[in-house]
Image: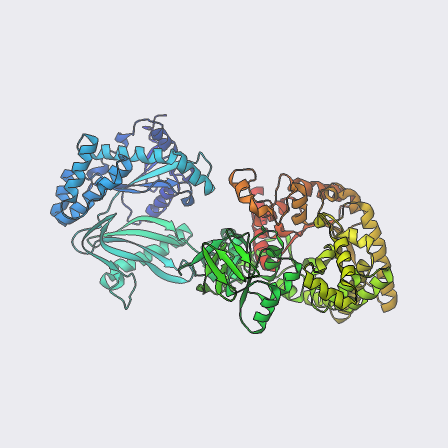
């Protein structure tokens, strides 16, 4: 490839053929600035093909740059220009072209010391980054440093420092091109999402001198706060700062008037006004909030570069909404510009990124947000702390269903074990609690009530901060930012809903969950896990009494104590959702989860049941299973102990009658868990139908309901056609389905999942992002077979993947009806659903 071809080196003019895919984002941005008539120094773009050719050893086309060094100061800078800024690139090299002749000219104009600083800066940069000499040899400073650096270069290279500016430029271009092709650079940009063979463009630009008489210096300015997104002029102006060289009388000015010192607005109001005008123009023409890099040379402005303002999640929402409201971008584009996961930062407190952090340890960021509280090691202590009005953090090796009360009483949760779909993670997301699981190096001693991490010991009662967004555990009370559920947040989601897309429901187990779901505009409840209702202190004794009952009649009598409580629960959910669909999953967990396993708990249970301790111990042992998650649970329990499902069905239907009389008509959706055979559905359906008929007769009321299946086993997905014959809907429980498809425990996978993803065994953690190839194929197969049998059947996903943007995209493509996720992930899902719909419409055009 001969890069002397004119298409490989192009001067950036308004009409030049500059393309982002060939020349990179920086070259294209500079062309747009030039088209706006902004004072941009003369610039050239080298295409990705040209850079690749240089890296391969072809000659640098010096002729293409003829006249480049003929400007007044004779200096140029070389900057990387990848396709997107996130991909990075080799470091910028400034002051290319300086030599003894230019140095003498500059010394006469800006003073010997300033000229020395510029020359020294380039000699050091060239020696270290281009000639690859030892950096320690070129750490000179002060008087005589320039002469020392030039002598060191000559001694090491056996030749004088290059005086030909074009030879200098060729060396810089060759070095930057080869650096981009190096293995380290490839790995770094691949980690940022770039393909391994991503091209790099280079921009060669005349430098405006930022030293000299009058007002001279360099700076940057932006017009929005990077953390909050509110309008605010920020940046800095450094007088007598040219590239990396600092001259005499260097002074840093504030941009706007400030009590702490002089500002550019006061010293040079005309220049400041021009910068503001340039910023407004860049926002409108580039359709983005930009940070502008500028140089002032003896009172004249040059615009060197402009980059997209770095921003926090909350700032990204405000910026996108403001641009759309001002007519700069369409509403659909504002929706597309916000990363769905960014919304989680707005829903919760966050650690202020500007504040210091005292890091203890890291873990898996299982539930976003941040909170500070005192360490507690069990649910009882958490409840006691909450009753005193003291925020606490529940720290456990891993949580179990009995810990739910403690989680409700805590402001955050930290566990030593677990993954993104472990018990602690799922419940914390539902409650909106910051949560870190699988914390590396965390050692909990529950007897001594201490935890050790990072070589430090923390006792119960000491204060820590959980940053569930980053997965960092911090010592003490960190500075927190308030949630940002403001007008911009509401507006963005209104535009998202208008864009359409797959439906979004919430997983809600309590009235508090349901109210949160309604506040976030969920379209109903897609999963109500009824077993969480059984762990309340006033229900647990009746549940345990039922477990120890010897006959169906005794079990029925025990469950009658729970019936009015369940009815009250369901009535509250129906009333809060006001006619929106509510999907209630029948009892799912194995019975042993409701029983104590320590000796003290067993003794208390024996006393409450008036039974010998030996009898209680034998019964608990008899209920234990080698693999309880694959044992007597879900529909298997409903068939072998049918009294539980009978009671729940009655509570649902009686609540339906009651809620319908008070408000909107209710059509409950009853979901059977862990189904793997059509006959299971038939058996449960017959009993539920019988209960429905009995309630209709007793209450003299007519109602309808929908019966469906939670598809959690591979067999259920493969036999979905048979199952659909008796089901109004199928909802894929992707947590268990992923677990069973992979043969992985979702609670233990976190121990090695990072290694697996790092070595490319899995592209992503399959419990975090839906596995399209394996689990996804089961979903598609199940949906296809179900719809062949029953074209009108409702298909959905109610596992934690329902709140994952990539997984929502899969569900949209598959034509599913809705996804259901934790209440605090509903906004994320709404935005992701809208983006999938917009993306699909764009692809159709």
The quadrant holding residue 252 is: bottom left
Q: Is residue 796 left or right of residue 467?
A: right
Q: Quadrant of the N terminus?
A: top left
- Residue 620 at x, y percent in the picture: 75, 57
Residue in the image at 41% along x and 34% along y: 183
- Residue 42 at x, y percent in the picture: 27, 42
Colour convention of the picture: rainbow
The quadrant holding residue 182 is: top left
Q: Is residue 87 left or right of residue 41?
A: right
Q: Is residue 169 left or right of residue 212?
A: right
Q: Is residue 547 left or right of residue 290?
A: right
Q: Quadrant of the C terminus?
A: top right
Q: How many marks?
A: 0
Q: Is residue 503 visible?
A: yes
- Residue 58 at x, y percent in the picture: 32, 26
Which one is nearer the viewer's eye here, 553 or 583?
Answer: 553
- Most extreme residue toward the left, as rendered? 108
- Residue 694 at x, y percent in the picture: 87, 63
Which one is nearer the viewer's eye here, 249 or 565?
Answer: 565
| 297 over 160 or under it: above or below | below
Q: Is residue 579 visible?
A: no
- Most extreme residue toward the bottom, as rendered? 388
Residue in the image at 58% along x and 50% along y: 419
């Amino acid at each position: 490839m001969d890069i002397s071809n004119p298409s490989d080196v192009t001067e950036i003019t308004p009409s030049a053929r500059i393309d982002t895919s060939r020349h990179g984002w920086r070259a294209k941005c500079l062309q747009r600035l030039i088209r706006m008539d902004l004072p941009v120094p003369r610039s050239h773009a080298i295409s990705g093909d040209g850079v690749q050719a240089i890296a391969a050893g072809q000659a640098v086309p010096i002729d293409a740059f003829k006249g480049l060094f003929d400007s007044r100061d004779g200096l140029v800078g070389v900057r990387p220009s990848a396709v997107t800024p996130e991909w990075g690139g080799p470091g910028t090299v400034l002051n290319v072209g300086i030599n003894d002749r230019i140095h003498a000219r500059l010394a006469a104009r800006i003073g010997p010391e300033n000229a020395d600083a510029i020359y020294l800066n380039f000699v050091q940069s060239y020696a270290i980054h281009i000639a690859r000499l030892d950096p320690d040899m070129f750490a000179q400073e002060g008087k005589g440093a320039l002469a020392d650096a030039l002598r060191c270069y000559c001694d090491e290279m056996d030749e004088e420092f290059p005086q030909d500016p074009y030879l200098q430029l060729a060396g810089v271009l060759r070095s930057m091109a080869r650096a981009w092709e190096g293995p380290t650079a490839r790995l770094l940009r691949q980690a940022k999402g770039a393909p391994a063979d991503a091209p790099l463009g280079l921009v060669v630009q005349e430098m405006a001198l930022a030293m000299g008489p009058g007002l001279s210096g360099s700076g940057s300015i932006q017009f929005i706060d990077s953390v909050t997104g509110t309008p605010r002029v920020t940046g800095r102006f450094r007088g007598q700062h040219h590239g990396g060289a600092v001259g005499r009388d260097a002074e840093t000015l504030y941009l706007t008037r400030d009590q702490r010192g002089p500002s550019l607005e006061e010293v040079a109001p005309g220049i400041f006004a021009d910068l503001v005008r340039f910023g407004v123009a860049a926002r409108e023409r580039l359709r983005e909030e930009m940070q502008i890099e500028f140089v002032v040379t003896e009172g004249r402005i040059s615009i060197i570069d402009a980059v997209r303002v770095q921003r926090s999640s909350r700032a990204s929402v405000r910026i996108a909404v403001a641009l759309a409201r001002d007519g700069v971008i369409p509403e659909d584009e504002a929706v597309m510009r916000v990363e769905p996961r960014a919304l989680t930062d707005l829903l919760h407190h966050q650690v202020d990124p500007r504040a210091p952090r005292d890091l203890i340890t890291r873990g898996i960021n299982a539930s976003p947000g941040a909170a500070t509280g005192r360490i507690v090691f069990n649910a009882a202590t958490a409840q006691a702390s909450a009753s005193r009005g003291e925020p606490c953090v529940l720290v456990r090796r891993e949580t179990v269903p009995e810990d739910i009360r403690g989680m409700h009483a805590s402001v955050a949760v930290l566990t030593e074990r677990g993954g993104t779909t472990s018990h602690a993670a799922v419940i914390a997301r539902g409650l909106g609690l910051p949560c870190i699981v699988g914390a590396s190096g965390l050692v909990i001693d529950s007897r001594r009530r201490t935890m050790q991490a990072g070589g430090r010991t923390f006792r119960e009662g000491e204060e820590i901060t959980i940053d569930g967004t980053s997965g960092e555990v911090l010592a003490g009370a960190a500075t927190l930012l308030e949630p940002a559920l403001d007008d911009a947040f509401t507006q963005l989601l209104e535009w998202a809903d208008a864009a359409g897309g797959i439906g979004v429901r919430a997983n809600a187990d309590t009235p508090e969950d349901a109210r949160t779901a309604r506040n976030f505009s969920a379209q109903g409840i897609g999963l109500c896990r009824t077993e969480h209702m059984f762990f309340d202190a006033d229900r647990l004794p009746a549940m345990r009494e039922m477990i120890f009952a010897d006959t169906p009649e005794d079990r029925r009598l025990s469950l009658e104590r729970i019936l009015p409580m369940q009815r009250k629960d369901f009535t509250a959910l129906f009333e809060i959702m006001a006619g929106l669909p509510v999907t209630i999953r029948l009892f799912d967990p194995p019975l042993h989860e409701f029983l104590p396993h320590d000796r003290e708990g067993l003794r208390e249970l024996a006393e409450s049941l008036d039974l010998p301790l030996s009898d209680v111990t034998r019964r608990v042992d008899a209920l234990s299973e080698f693999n309880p998650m694959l044992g007597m649970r879900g529909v298997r329990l409903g068939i072998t102990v049918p009294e539980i499902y009978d009671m729940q069905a009655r509570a649902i239907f009686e609540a339906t009658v009651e809620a319908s009389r008070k408000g909107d008509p209710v059509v409950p959706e009853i979901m059977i868990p862990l189904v793997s055979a059509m006959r299971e559905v038939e058996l449960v359906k017959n009993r539920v139908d019988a209960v429905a008929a009995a309630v209709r007769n007793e209450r003299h009321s007519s109602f309808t309901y929908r019966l469906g299946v939670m598809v959690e086993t591979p067999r259920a997905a493969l036999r979905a056609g048979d199952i659909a014959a008796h089901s109004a809907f199928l909802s894929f429980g992707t947590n268990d389905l992923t677990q069973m498809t992979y043969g992985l425990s979702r609670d233990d996978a976190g121990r090695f999942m990072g290694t697996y993803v790092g070595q490319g065994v899995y592209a992503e953690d399959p419990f975090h992002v839906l596995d399209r190839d394996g689990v996804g194929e089961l979903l598609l197969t199940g949906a296809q077979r179900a719809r062949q049998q029953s074209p009108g059947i409702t298909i959905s996903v109610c596992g934690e993947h329902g709140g994952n943007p990539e997984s929502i995209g899969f569900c949209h493509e598959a034509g599913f009806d809705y996804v259901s996720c934790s209440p605090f992930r509903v906004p994320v899902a709404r935005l992701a659903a809208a983006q999938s719909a917009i993306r699909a419409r764009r692809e159709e055009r």
